[in-house]
Amino acid sequence: MTPHISRRTTLSIATAVAAGALLTGALATTGASAQPSAPSATPLALSATAHADLVHDASAQAADTAKELKLGSKEKLVVRDVVKDRDGATHTRYERTYDGLPVLGGDLVVHRTKSGAREGVTRATSKSIDVATSGASLTAAPSGARKVVWAASGTPRLAYEKVVKSTEKDGTPSRLHVVTDAATGKKIFAYDDIKTGAGESQYSGSVDIGTKESGGSYALTDDTRGGHSTYDLKHGESGQGTLFTDDDDKWGDGTTNDAATAGVDAAYGAQVTWDYYKSVHGRSGINGDGKGAYSRVHYGNAYVNAFWDDSCFCMTYGDGEGDAKPLTSIDVAAHEMSHGVTAATGNMEYSGESGGLNEATSDIFGTSVEFYANNAKDVGDYLIGETIDINGDGSPLRYMDKPSKDGSSLDSWSADAGNVDVHYSSGIANHFFYLLSEGSGKKTINGVDYDSPTSDGSTVTGIGRDKAEKIWFKALTTYFTSTTDYADARKGTVSAATDLYGADSAEVKAVEAAWSGVNVK
């Protein structure tokens, strides 16, 4: 089975050093799962058992699928996920191995109709693989490295992948993946898999949260959402931490004086994120398997960041400058958990344009969850991290209507976009999503004023956030791959809108217009 490449994401701020920080300048099938009027190509809500059955069936047919796709005799397909639409169509996502080695950038998605007929294939690479996996001409593998086939760029070749663990200056743990050519020893690629990224809460007011009674006390564990639990690291930087417990099931006091307050915010953020994905997209949990993640709060001292870690399937939150502003707001929590959804689906490489799309996906769904939560204390907006005061002056971390307002993010695409930090190149897709949802020009939403320009001076008419987020989710889960760039993202979202609303629909035309508005043509 292809080894899973662990990914971690952080929210990252401009001063954060770690690549991929959130704040860097960084059921059996349930009929009630979708609206009756939902397009037939929307994902069907599946129970964990139903999803597991689809994966099992696809795995049993993987060898036949490899032959159908005319893959070489040394190539095998490993099922990673299956999405089933309401009309019965399926989209099966595969990783690939070659001569027993994992193929980085070899993932693909096979689209089939209800009858099982192959309708198309979305590939991370169109190149065939034919490499020697052993030989005297190879350089010695770096200590601790694994042998892989690199297919994400250029001609597929044998390579070594080594993971270097360290800690960045701001306290963010780092796991740098370095891929080198096995023949020459030269570096091909590198990325950091840290993508920085009833109680009284600090940001959302009085909220109801899922807890569990045990032995006469209560634990901050939500069995209705896959067993998500929240732990206190007590300013440590390793381990799972201590599970929050309470005698009377009343948690936090709304301030940092009570350590449980941050736990309430983290648990609430995980709760509304779970509910959003299940209610809006029919996805039961981050992996679609009904299993909850867990959250850790009070990481380090005055740690101004948050991150998702695939290896522990968990979110981790620092307490901010002076330990006074924990990074546990709704949009931050949803941003981090959405990195997990991306890792389980499109899994865009966290570097270059694909990395910008990875980051933007978390901003897009962080924003969508915030609107979905409909919380009077933290109303929905197109601002990222506006409540945690990461800049110390009350300004948000990022702006979706005009990303360049943060001083670094890109409003539109240029040939240099792939060379920009992923937290800034994400502005292109964030801007696209705003234009697709709300349109260009001036607008006031929930008391916030926006004024969104276009790169070509065109006027874009929005189709509403509800449709925009469904288009992005379908593209992510059925058309995006590890190597998707902005041109591919345009194609993928056009395909998604076509599936959902029809080839000549206003929605497809709006997707095309919004991409043109950010110079992706």
Image (cartoon, helix red, strand yellow):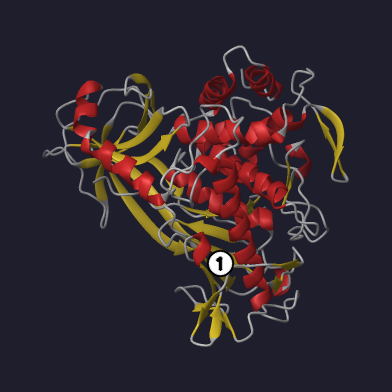
- Residue at 48% x, 31% y: name it: 86
Secondary structure, mark 1, is loop
The answer to whether residue 404 of the structure is visible from this angle is: yes
Foreground pick, 33 / 65 = 33
Q: Is 283 in front, or is 336?
A: 283
Coordinates of residue 262 in the picture (x, y in percent): 66, 71
Residue at 83% x, 58% y is: 393
Dot 1 alpha-carbon crowd within 10 angstroms: few under 14, some 14 to 19, many 20 or more: many
Q: Amino acid at mark 1?
A: Gly
Q: Does 411 sit above or below residue 423?
A: above
Q: Quadrant of the image for the C terminus?
A: top right
Q: Residue furthest top?
A: 504
> Residue 360, relative to residue 109: is it above or below?
below
Q: Residue furthest left?
A: 136
Q: Position of residue 229 (x, y in %)?
A: 51, 69
149 is higher (above) or lower (below) than 87: below
Residue nearer the viewer, 168 or 117: 117
Q: Residue 17: image x %, image y %?
A: 58, 56
Question: Residue 67 at x, y = what percent?
Answer: 19, 24
395 horizontally vs 154: left or right = right
Q: Is residue 184 visible?
A: no
Residue at 31% from the left image edge and 44% from the top image edge: 53
Image quadrant assignment for residue 326: bottom right
Mark count: 1
User: Which quarter of the figure has residue 62?
Assistant: top left
Q: Residue at x 57, y 72 (%)?
A: 211
Q: Which residue is mark 1?
A: 171
